[in-house]
Amino acid sequence: MTTPLAERLSRLAREHAASAGGARRSGGIPEEPDGRAGPDGRAATARGGAATPAVAILKDTRVLVVRAGDVVVKAHPEGTDEAALTARLRAALALPGVLLPPLTDRVEHVAGRPVTVWPAGEPVEPSDPAAAPWEAAAGLLARLHAVPAAGLALPPSGGPARVPRAVSRLDALDGAYAGPAAVIREAFRTLPVLSGAGGTGPGAGRPAHGDWHLGQIVRYEGEWVLIDVDDLGAGDPAWDLARPAAWFATGLLDPDLWGRFLTAYLDAGGSAVSRADPWRELDAPARALTVQLAATAVAAAGAEGRPLDEVEQALVSSCGRIAHAAVRP
Amino acid sequence: MRCPKCSGNMRTYDRNGVHIEQCENCRGIFLDYGELETLARVESQWSQQHYSSPPPPHGGPAWGAPHHGHRGHRDRGFMGMLFSS
């Protein structure tokens, strides 16, 4: 393993795997991760001996996610609101078939970091977007959005807070990225007030995943379910459609795939947007997600010290149009 | 008015804003000046409505990029973005 924390997480995962025994071995989950196991495609595999399950780092960003056999443990960022995290774990346990249920609603601690423990699922095959389970994902979001929020005691959804956090990452960039950074900041300033609670939208105060993309769905016990409750909360559920909406509006996502996703969401009774005019509800969150995506992408290019690629340029162009559209009468 | 072909009686009809005279005897039709052009214009409007490519089913935002062949479908950068926060 690469770090002491990762090593300790893998030990915790192996303990949970051992205590869970073979009970979940029937879930169709491969015993040996194939090195592609991480939803973000950055798996670093370290195989244990014959007696210990294979260990893989699935994600190493603000969070560290380690898989050992059929168990995945996640170290959350320092400073995580643990009461909110516990409420999110309980909501996941209360919504089986929609959200992956954690193995326990107890938040553990490793090296000062809050840690949650999950069963492993099978991620979406990343090579062919057209073959991704767009309809299944849309159906899951529709079901999540239909749950009465009152019974779940959820904290506010974390989606809107991700936008200023992403934009603040531009501050660390050098002058080579000043042009695109200025465009993104200008678009950011034109956004409507970002309400964490979704206080004003038509879907105010309903359950929202808060950070949905194709890496946030896995197959578990033969069914697709949503994963990652870190931003789950009461908010405007239109935010969960806003990332693919932003991809579509930027010209990145095939309009047919966007149409499949949105149609499936509406056909499943999804209530975040209207069939007659979905962009009435999508426009504001899709602008915000475009700014977030552009800031994240430009910050990533800056961290690697390379020029913007075509996708990053397209996102910055969208930000330019967002700022331009806002100043026109 | 009399039909120029068979001298039968012609009756005036008004169809969708176009005056036509039709012979009650031989069913021949007489068009006034400009009425053929009016018919052609109405026909081309109808075919534009029915045969041009339909707009995207769910619309899009005012600030959206033109979708003249989306760029990123197979782009590695976008493929990664599909799966990451």
Image: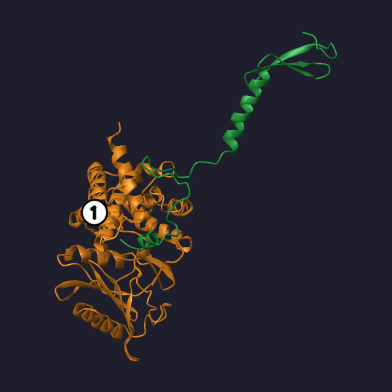
Chain colours: A orange, B green
Whether residue A232 can be seen here:
no
Rendered position, B42 above or below A55: above
Q: Secondary structure at mark 1?
A: helix
Q: Which residue: 35% across, 64% down?
A: A216
Name the residue nearer the viewer: A89 or A134: A134
Q: From the top left corner, tell me how far across and down residue B82 is, in percent.
A: 38, 60
Instruction: Say how many tags the image has.
Output: 1
Name the residue nearer the viewer: A269 or A224: A224
Q: Which residue: 44% across, 57% down?
A: B73
Residue extending farthest to the right is B6
Q: Chain of mark 1?
A: A
Rendered position, B55 above or below A59: above
Q: From the top left corner, tell me how far across and down residue A2 is, in percent.
A: 24, 79
Quadrant of the image for the N terminus of chain A?
Answer: bottom left
Q: From the top left corner, tell me how far across and down residue A171 is, in percent.
A: 18, 54
Name the residue nearer the viewer: A143 or A198: A198
Find disc 1 in the rendering and name its residue.
A176
Name the residue nearer the viewer: A323 or A192: A323
Q: From the top left corner, tell me how far across and down residue A131 is, in percent.
A: 48, 63
Whether residue A92 can be seen here:
yes
Quadrant of the image for the C terminus of chain A?
Answer: top left
Q: Which residue: 35% across, 67% down?
A: A96
Q: Quadrant of residue A91?
A: bottom left
Q: Which residue: 27% across, 49% down?
A: A180
Sort mark 1 into few (<14), some (14-19) or many (20+) by Cα contacts within 10 Å. Answer: few
The type of residue carrying mark 1 is Ala
